[in-house]
Amino acid sequence: DTEVTQTPKHLVMGMTNKKSLKCEQHMGHRAMYWYKQKAKKPPELMFVYSYEKLSINESVPSRFSPECPNSSLLNLHLHALQPEDSALYLCASSQGPGQYEQYFGPGTRLTVT
Amino acid sequence: DQQVKQNSPSLSVQEGRISILNCDYTNSMFDYFLWYKKYPAEGPTFLISISSIKDKNEDGRFTVFLNKSAKHLSLHIVPSQPGDSAVYFCAASPRFERPATGTASKLTFGTGTRLQVTL
């Protein structure tokens, strides 16, 4: 079972809204990731959580705030976004030490109006 | 600074023939390489991977070749099927190190190649 789930599938929000994206995996993976993907571009790493602790922040603006409540869940809190933040937001997980393969969820298509 | 490049943005292949997708990298610290397939509006799906200690890895119709001296890898799909039509990304990771990154792998993705398999 290599399933990573993400909700919602689609989200439209105004620039003054606060919303959250959710990601869940039940594979016992100990690392979880947020990526952003724009059309015709590769996924760009945003954040990495390792054993529920933030280990990598790729200089992401503070209007994106990640949270890892437990080893199965990963949230991305959104506040005061800009239209250029519209993209596909992907969550991924990987097993643990020495395991390079990351397994992706279906993504949340975010539109900021 | 694109450390992983896929120079062919698109490729069209007839059903039953071989598809060859290429990927070049510049960072000599990359030690592990992966291929992902992506359909529109879906997340990337892991296909196959290879460690730098190997030069070939095979899984069913998919084979990945690695040429370390040329910093080049390729994905061969034989025979190609219409369901293989998707965007393919190669990805690379430096050697897994602890405790700097703990349990996390850090992938750098290529720009993608759109494969179309025609009937």
Image (spheres, rainbow, N blue to C red):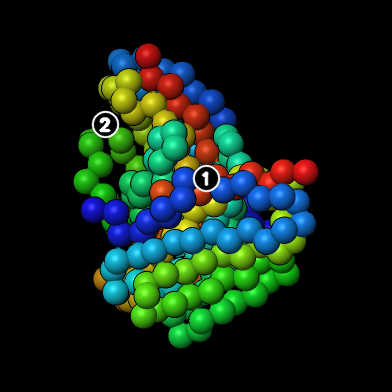
Q: Provide the residue designation for mark 2.
A: A63
Amino acid type at circle 1 is: Ser
Front-most of A38 and A12?
A: A38
Picture residue at 29% right of the left edge, 74% below the top: B28
Picture residue at 41% right of the left edge, 18% below the top: A13
In percent of width and height, residue A97 lies at: 44, 74
Residue B91 seen: yes
Examine the rendered structure and indicate whether residue A30 appears above or below residue B38. Answer: below
Q: Provide the residue designation for mark 1.
A: B10
Examine the rendered structure and indicate whether residue A30 appears above or below residue A14. Answer: below
Mark 2: few, some, or many residues within 10 Å (few <14, many ≥20)? few
Examine the rendered structure and indicate whether residue B68 appears above or below residue A10. Answer: below
Picture residue at 26% right of the left edge, 50% below the top: A58
For label 1, the SS is strand
Chain to which the residue tagged by mark 1 belongs: B
Mark 1: few, some, or many residues within 10 Å (few <14, many ≥20)? some
Residue A4 located left or right of residue A83: right
Residue B105 seen: no
